[in-house]
Amino acid sequence: MPIQLQAEPLLDLPTLPAGWELAATGVGSNFDVLVVAADTPFDARRAGESSRYRVYKRAGGSFESFEFVAAGRAAYRYVQPIGDKDFLLVTPWLYEGVENTGHIWSFDGTLVGQLALGQGIEHVQTSARSEVWVAYNDEGIFSAIEPGLACFDRTGKRVFSFADSVANDDNPDVPPIDDCYALNVLSENEVWIYYYSAFPLVRLVDKQLDGIWPRVPGLGAHAFAVGEKSVFFAGDYGDRSLITRYFPESGRIEMGHAIGDGQQLEFTRAIGRADRLYLVANATFWLLHAD
């Protein structure tokens, strides 16, 4: 029987200026919610049209925001906090004229740094010590020769490569990443990933393999939350709003949907941080806690 998981309404998306669109959403290591809006459509930004961005941060009862203008092909898709007060905005590809995919902006709208994070980027999450974890899609892996999952320090130096450190001859049971579907940076030391094409759930502790569950359910999931006993997967190839609850110890699964205000949530975005699964539906952030 399908399960129904009651989602908690967390906060409403900020009201965007007329003609603006939602460009990125993110959740920091301390669970601050970040929203990025742009005054230009993604395709126009990717084509090189200068764009104005507004970054919103929700840490308490209301959003704080700042604006900046990005010249050239800065088609940002990802946002994370970095350092004490700065924000990392990331574009998935090195479009013409873009030297680095990661740009660090201060709250006064000043570009204060750039990071070379590679190409074909699918997910970005930072840790409390501002390490940048980057997951890559199939185009990044096979065209740009990215390692599937990488970690960079605050200066942009790569300090971990999944292809070199985990999916190697020392760990024959770990399949290579063909497309990293989902990433969850639980803490400074613990990171989980879920990936195509073998669909394992992998736990890293201190950048070393600490656990693997081969071919788990939730095929096509694009986010997940990790609880003490279960993992919540968001999405599936056949149903983008499906929620799968997986119990690693027993292998048992339950499938169903998130319910908000008595209605099934048809979410358009999902983010997993630690045991929290954030769903964006009906201009609202909803929250599920994995148990």
Image (cartoon, rainbow, N blue to C red):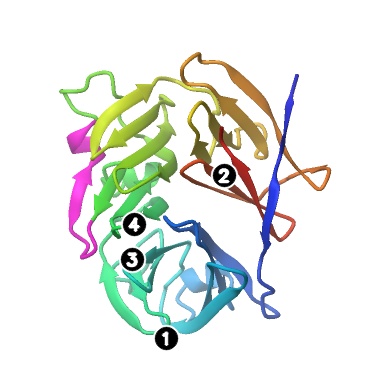
According to the image, label 3 marks what residue?
102
Q: Can you tell which of label 4 and label 3 is closer to the viewer?
A: 4
Q: Can you tell which of label 3 and label 1 is closer to the viewer?
A: 1
Q: Earlier in the sequence, mark 1 or mark 2?
A: 1
Which amino acid is tagged 2? Leu
According to the image, label 2 marks what residue?
277
- What secondary structure is marked by label 1? loop
Tag 3: Cα neighbours inside 10 Å, few (<14), some, or many (≥20)? many
Q: Earlier in the sequence, mark 4 or mark 2?
A: 4
User: Gap between marks 3 and 2, in whole Å?
Assistant: 25 Å
- What secondary structure is marked by label 3? strand
Which quadrant holds residue 173? top left
Which amino acid is tagged 1? Asp
Q: Is residue 159 magenta?
A: yes
Q: Earlier in the sequence, mark 4 or mark 3?
A: 3
- Image: 166 above or below 60: above
User: Gap between marks 3 and 1, in whole Å?
Assistant: 18 Å
The disc at residue 108 is 1
* Residue 54, position as x, y percentages in the image: 53, 78
Q: Earlier in the sequence, mark 3 or mark 2?
A: 3
User: Gap between marks 1 and 2, in whole Å?
Assistant: 30 Å
- What secondary structure is marked by label 4? loop
The span picked out in magenta is: 153-166
